[in-house]
Amino acid sequence: MAKRTIHSNELFNDVKIPKEYNPPIIVAYNIKTPENIGNIIRLAGNSVCKEVLFVTKDENIRSSKIKKTASSAYNSVNWSFCNEVELKEKIPSDYKWIAIETSSDSENIYQVKLPNKIALFVGNEINGIDSVFLDKCHEIVHIPLLGNTTSMNVSHALAVALFEWQRQIYN
């Protein structure tokens, strides 16, 4: 049996960006791993995001690894590093800040109506999002995990959240 090759433009010709689409903003707090930074940029390209903001104090991140992982999104997605003070100026005031974090006050992402104008926050690979920073968010959501492993890679969690947001706005 011959294997059929499908080009990506054939797969998605039935998907149209909604007329009232407000591109999400990704805020990645204190991400340390260049591969995770690259994966987040690539995911932003997959999801037609407005911007990716990496909130960090670390200026010594290896851009070659970021570029390799981000692939073509490296040059096509609007992304930058900023500090906490600059962050508020970079997000439009009508966007809701939604943190993806497992905490005592988080809600199941599948039971929450996510806002149309959204800034999705993800945190550091080890410590997540700092509680002072979490307090600035309008809402905290978690991804329910059924297995014994109680955490996800930051870029995987972001993918679940972005595609749940897209599912909600497409329906």
Image (cartoon, grey):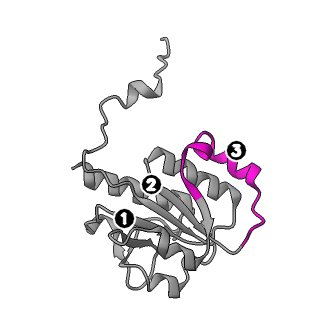
Magenta residue check for 36: no
State how far apart marks 1 and 3 are (Cα): 28 Å
Q: Name the residue under label 2.
A: 50
Q: Name the residue under label 1.
A: 118
Q: Position of residue 137 (x, y in %)?
A: 41, 79
Where 4 sits versus 118, above or below? above
The local secondary structure at tag 1 comes to strand
Residue situated in front as seen by the camera: 158 or 70: 70
Disc 3 residue type (three-letter): Lys
Where 78 sits versus 114, above or below? above
- Disc 1 or 2, which lies upstream in sequence? 2
Where 10 sits versus 133, above or below? above
Query: Which segment is the magenta one?
Result: 58-79
Badge 1: residue crowd in 10 Å (few <14, some 14–19, many ≥20): many
Badge 2: residue crowd in 10 Å (few <14, some 14–19, many ≥20): some
Q: Are marks 2 and 3 in contact (CB under 8 Å)?
A: no
- Disc 2 or 3, which lies upstream in sequence? 2
Disc 1 residue type (three-letter): Ile
Tell us which disc is closer to us: 1 or 3: 1
- Name of the residue lying farthest toward the front: 89
Q: Mark 3 points at which residue?
A: 68
Q: Are marks 1 and 2 in contact (CB under 8 Å)?
A: no
Disc 2 residue type (three-letter): Lys
The local secondary structure at tag 2 comes to loop
Q: Position of residue 147 (x, y in %)?
A: 47, 65
- Tell me if I can see residue 42 in this picture: yes
